[in-house]
Image (cartoon, rainbow, N blue to C red):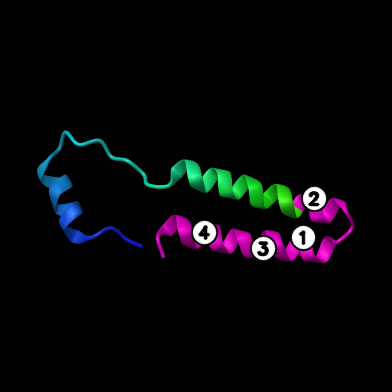
Amino acid sequence: MAEDDFRRWERELDPGAPEKAPGGRGLVVAAAATAAGCALLITLGDVRLGAVGLGLSSVILLLWRIGF
């Protein structure tokens, strides 16, 4: 979910606070694991399921990244 207004307001008042993107490493790990699993499915011969998995995971990761 999106961060609350109070935290955003606090960061505006404290310019020395570093800007940190939440979930950056977890997002990369999840994307890599999902891509590897779907590539394995495609390699094993289930091309349709692997392609659907890649498409669905792309949408989920995109929504996760934008904070929806």
Residue designated by label 1: 50
Q: Tell me: 60 left or right of 36.
A: left
Q: Is residue 24 above or below residue 65?
A: above
Helix, strand or loop at label 4? It is helix
The magenta stretch spans residue 44:
yes
Disc 4 residue type (three-letter): Leu
Amino acid type of disc 2?
A: Leu
Name the residue beneath numbered marker 2.
40
- Given the image, on which type of amino acid does mark 3 rest? Gly
Q: Residue furthest right?
A: 45
Q: Earlier in the sequence, mark 1 or mark 2?
A: 2
Which secondary structure lies at badge 1?
Answer: helix
Sequence order check, earlier mark of 3 and 2: 2
Query: Is label 3 in a helix, a strand or a loop?
Result: helix
Identify which amino acid the numbered label 1 is placed on: Gly
**Counting other residues with Cα less than 10 Å from the Cα at mark 3, is it few (<14), some (14-19), or many (20 or more)?**
few
Q: Which residues are magenta?
A: 39-68
The residue that mark 3 highlights is 55
The image shows residue 52, relative to residue 18, as above or below, that is: below
Mark number, residue 62 = 4
Residues under numbered marks 1 and 2 in contact, where contact means CB atoms less than 8 Å apart: yes
